[in-house]
């Protein structure tokens, strides 16, 4: 197992006291796997990514029974030990690439910083040329052929698509074992969005790196991902292979998200309205007790005030007192 997270709880203080923003989240990623976290905006997906990277500020309190990368306990690392892993074995692509690129340095200068000395084989006098060659090669790998114009540009001069490709180039400079892509296409046009997802899939195929993708758009990641974890308001609703969850979801939330995506409505007439999940995610000050989907779930019953445990069924896991298809399959 490359990444093993068990009962991850992240809490913060609010005016109403301590609140568990993430509530006992489980996530496992195998070597060479593309795994996607899916949920609405504000569901806690990015918090999970930042907990893995160690990017959370002191206002967040992180607890877990297990938060391991390979044989390393990430929660018990010193800052120096974490830096030895982050950026080398684990890299992250952020939502808004331009805000994470340094506006005071050219793209060429920033990419040179991503190439470490241990990645160079030449003598001291040869390293400058070798580093430049590696930077150009990185840009070519992400589909940027006119590298001179990009290398001499600043981040604010780039399009969203070009900036995201530059960030991907920086992230893969060391061929990390785990690449985290936190909604890397959220601000892009559909054509550019698909191009970025295909690019990530190509690196997965070429280098065998594991990818944790974070998205709220099931349709965009359908062809690339192997496993899905559905998360709502900080709780895992369901996880399993993409094929199983798309074909026969057990949890009402998975069913609802599928019903609101173009995956099930590819033949809709122009200007038709997609179905929507009634209501909105609760705020931190008003989190429901038990299953947090309860107030929006048409299947909710009094028993849902108790948080359901993850249960296994035919290779999937779901957290629901009243799953959709168990009775049908057993009858």
Image: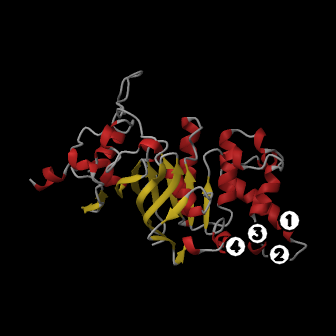
* Quadrant for the N terminus in the image: bottom left
Q: Tell which circle, 3 or 2, labels the residue nearer the N-terminal end.
A: 3
Above or below, comparing residue 10 to residue 81 in the picture: above
Find the distance from the CA under tag 1 to the CA under tag 3. Answer: 14 Å
Real-space CA distance between mark 3 and mark 2, rounded to the nearest whole angstrom: 13 Å
Asked if the residue under mark 2 is in contact with the one under mark 3, i.e. CB atoms within 8 Å, the reply is no
Q: Can you identify the residue that label 2 sits on?
A: 122
* Residue located at (65% from left, 68% from top): 88
165 vs 113, left or right, is: left
- Residue 192 in picture, x, y percent from top left: 59, 40
Q: Nearer the viewer, mark 4 or mark 3?
A: 4
Dot 2 and dot 1 residues touching (CB under 8 Å): yes
Residue position for label 4: 80
As helix, strand or loop, the secondary structure at mark 2 comes to: loop
Badge 4: few (under 14), some or many (20 or more) residues near its Cα, within 10 Å? few
Location of residue 211 in the rendering, given as x and y in whole percent from the top left corner = 52, 60
Which residue is more in the foreground, 319 or 262? Answer: 319
Earlier in the chain: of badge 1 and badge 3, it is 3
Identify the residue at horizontal 40%, vertical 60% (top origin). 24
In the rendered image, which residue does mark 3 sit on? 116
* Label drawn at residue 129: 1
Q: Secondary structure at mark 1?
A: helix
Give percent across and percent down for residue 195: 57, 44
Label 3 sits on a secondary structure element that is loop
Q: Which residue lies most toward the left here?
A: 331
């Amino acid at each position: 197992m490359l990444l093993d997270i068990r009962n991850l709880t992240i809490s913060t203080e609010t005016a109403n006291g301590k609140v568990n923003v993430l509530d006992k989240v489980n996530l496992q990623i195998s070597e060479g796997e593309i795994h996607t976290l899916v949920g609405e905006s504000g569901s806690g997906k990015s918090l999970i990514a930042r907990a893995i990277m160690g990017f959370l500020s002191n206002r967040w309190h992180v607890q877990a029974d297990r938060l391991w990368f390979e044989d390393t306990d990430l929660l018990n690392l010193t800052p120096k030990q974490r830096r030895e892993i982050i950026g080398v074995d684990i890299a992250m692509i952020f939502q808004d690439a331009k805000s994470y690129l340094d506006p005071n340095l050219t793209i060429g200068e920033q990419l040179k910083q991503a190439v470490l000395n241990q990645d160079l084989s030449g003598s001291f006098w040869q390293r400058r040329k070798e580093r430049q060659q590696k930077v150009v090669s990185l840009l070519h790998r992400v589909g940027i052929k006119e590298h001179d114009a990009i290398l001499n540009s600043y981040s604010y001069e780039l399009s969203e698509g070009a900036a995201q490709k530059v960030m991907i180039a920086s992230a893969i400079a060391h061929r990390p074992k785990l690449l985290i892509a936190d909604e890397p296409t959220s601000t892009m046009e559909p054509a550019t969005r698909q191009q970025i997802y295909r690019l990530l899939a190509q690196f997965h195929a070429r280098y065998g790196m594991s990818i944790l993708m974070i998205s709220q758009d099931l349709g965009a990641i359908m062809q690339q991902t192997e496993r899905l974890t559905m998360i709502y308001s900080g709780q895992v609703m369901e996880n399993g292979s993409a094929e199983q969850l798309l074909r026969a979801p057990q949890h009402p939330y998975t069913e609802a998200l599928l019903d609101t995506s173009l995956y099930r409505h590819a033949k809709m007439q122009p200007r038709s309205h997609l179905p929507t999940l009634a209501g909105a995610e609760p705020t931190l000050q008003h989190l429901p007790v038990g299953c947090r989907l309860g107030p929006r779930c048409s299947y909710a019953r009094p028993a849902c005030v108790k948080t359901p445990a993850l249960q296994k069924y035919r290779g999937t896991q779901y957290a629901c007192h009243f799953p959709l298809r168990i009775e049908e399959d057993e009858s």
